[in-house]
Image (cartoon, rainbow, N blue to C red):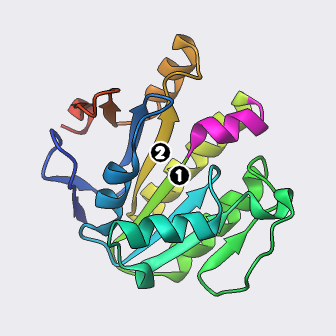
């Protein structure tokens, strides 16, 4: 199954199982790329949010006119920060961004229990690495990429360039077949050559 992309300087479609790494500056505005990715050619999507709460994710989806009825949200912050949680079928919680097993479990359930074209957005690898050690995060990202391949889904994984050293960035880049590099001015460079 092929998925259309709405990201500049990228191929028109990518095959199911593709993980796209979104490199961005620490202060980079990724919402436009993220929401365009989620609302294009999609039946269901899961936002794994390690940076904002479910309420903030819903506000972003609403602001960018993304169909919220297609959304599941995994909130990794509210429990740890003691925020109130509202029970809903489409909002899931784990205890903190370093509950990597919980994140994988929710993702696998989402992919197993939904049909059609599914997308996942992980925002962000950087926040996960802030809470958990890099090797555990590396392993979790590898497991998420395996789930995408197993279920013919696609994913967008955020990584902040300003936080990680060059070796860490290169290591994460080596896991992905598709790279989108956003600079401070909002310009986009891409490398999808491994998909060819």
In which quarter of the view is residue 85 placed?
bottom right
Say above or below: 2 vs 111: above
Answer left or right for 76 relative to 31.
right
Say above or below: 179 vs 77: above
Q: Which mark is residue 157?
A: 2
In which quarter of the view is residue 177 placed?
top left
Residue 14 on image: x %, y %: 23, 52
Answer left or right for 153 relative to 101.
left
Contact (CB < 8 A) between labels 2 and 1? yes
**Neighbours of disc 2 within 10 Å: few (<14), some (14-19), many (20+):** many
Tell me the residue that label 1 is attached to. Answer: 122
| Circle 1 SS class | strand
Q: Which residues are magenta?
A: 124-133
Give the Cα separation between the discs numbered 2 and 1. Answer: 5 Å
**Neighbours of disc 1 within 10 Å: few (<14), some (14-19), many (20+):** many
Answer left or right for 126 relative to 120.
right
Residue 170 on image: x %, y %: 48, 18
Residue 121 on image: x %, y %: 47, 56
Q: Residue at x 83, y 57 (%)?
A: 81
Say above or below: 34 vs 136: below
Q: Quadrant of the N terminus?
A: bottom left
Residue 2 on image: x %, y %: 22, 62
Q: In the image, is residue 2 part of the stretch drawn in magenta?
A: no
Say above or below: 167 vs 103: above
């Amino acid at each position: 199954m092929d998925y259309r992309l709405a990201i500049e300087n990228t191929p028109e479609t990518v095959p199911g199982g593709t993980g796209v790494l979104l490199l961005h500056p620490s202060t980079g505005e990724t919402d436009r790329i993220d929401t365009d990715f989620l609302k294009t050619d999609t039946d269901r999507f899961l936002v794994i949010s390690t940076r904002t709460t479910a309420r903030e994710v819903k506000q972003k989806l609403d602001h960018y006119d993304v169909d919220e009825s297609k959304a599941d949200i995994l909130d990794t912050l509210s429990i740890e920060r003691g925020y109130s949680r509202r029970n809903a079928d489409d909002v899931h919680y784990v205890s903190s961004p370093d509950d990597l097993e919980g994140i994988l479990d929710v993702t696998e359930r989402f992919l197993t229990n939904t049909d059609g074209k599914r997308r996942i957005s992980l925002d962000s690898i950087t926040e996960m690495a802030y809470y958990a050690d890099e090797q555990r995060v590396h392993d979790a990202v590898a497991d998420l990429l395996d789930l995408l391949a197993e279920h013919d889904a696609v994913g967008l994984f955020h990584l902040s360039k300003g936080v990680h050293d060059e070796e860490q960035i290169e290591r994460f880049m080596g896991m992905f077949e598709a790279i989108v590099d956003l600079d401070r001015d909002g310009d986009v460079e891409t490398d999808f050559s491994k998909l060819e």
